[in-house]
Image (cartoon, coloured by chain):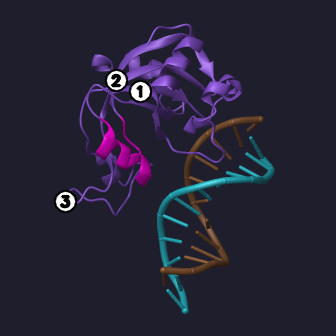
Chain colours: A purple, B cyan, C brown
Amino acid sequence: MNYWLMKSEPDEFSIDDLAARPNQTEGWNGIRNYQARNFMRDAMQIGDRVFFYHSSCKVPAVVGVAEVVSGTYPDECAWDPESPYFDPKSTPEAARWLKLDIHFLKKFASAVPLCDIKSHPGLADMMLVQKGSRLSIQPVTEIQWQLIHQMAGETP
DNA sequence: GCCAACGTTGGC
DNA sequence: GCCAACGTTGGC
């Protein structure tokens, strides 16, 4: 099993939104970065665990855990001219952008803010805290997975 | 709102 | 294939 971190702006789609979805599951659409897409397509597997991260908000933080419950399939909002994620270069015949389904597992009673992650020496290697790192889907090591759970007062 | 860092685009 | 210009991300 692999571990990941996925960013979402809570104003757009928060962990509470995920928990409120039918089956507490949602297709993770809108990924428009090749590296992130390739992680989904080539490395993410059903059963993998995901940190749900709130970005571009007052307190950026890891706020909970989700699970990958599907393989990738076309992100059809790329075909919708009305969508903010519209990309005319993606077609139903040759889908450029993909998504997969994420299922809510838990919300941390106390979120782990970015500033705490930054100040923890054991997490200095996390992609999240690397200068200029903007990837919205990132791999997380098992050590990092456990440490952040520890900081949240949760058991992995 | 600012701006550093990064990815993408497109002319050459 | 280079690289300048541009757009986006995302913390602050």
Point out which mark residue A50 bears: 1
Asked if badge 3 and badge 1 are on a common chain, one would say yes
Q: Amino acid at mark 2?
A: Glu
Q: Residue at x 37, y 48 (%)?
A: A37
Name the side, left or right, on which A49 lies relative to A92.
right
The disc labelled 1 sits on which kind of residue?
Answer: Val
C2 shown above or below A129 = below
| Bounds of the magenta segment | A28-44
Q: Residue A47: x, y in percent? A: 28, 25
Q: Does dot 2 land on a helix, a strand or a loop?
A: strand
**Cα distance between the residues tagged 3 and 1:** 30 Å
Task: State whether discs 1 and 2 lie on one chain.
Answer: yes
Marked residue nearer the N-terminal end (3 or 2): 2
- Give the residue at mark 2: A67
Query: In the rendered structure, the residue with mark 1 lies on which chain?
Result: A
Residue at figure coordinates x 62%, y 25% from the top left: A122
Earlier in the chain: of badge 3 and badge 1, it is: 1
A79 is higher (above) or lower (below) than A45: below
Secondary structure of the residue carrying numbered label 3? loop
Tag 3: amino acid? Glu
**Disc 3 from disc 2: Cα separation:** 29 Å
Q: Are marks 3 and 1 in contact (CB under 8 Å)?
A: no
- Front residue of A17/A136: it is A136
- 1 or 2: tag closer to the N-terminus: 1
Query: Relative to A56, is A30 on the left or the right?
Result: left
* Identity of the residue drawn at 19% across and 59% down: A93
Position in image of residue A104 (x %, y %) = 37, 19
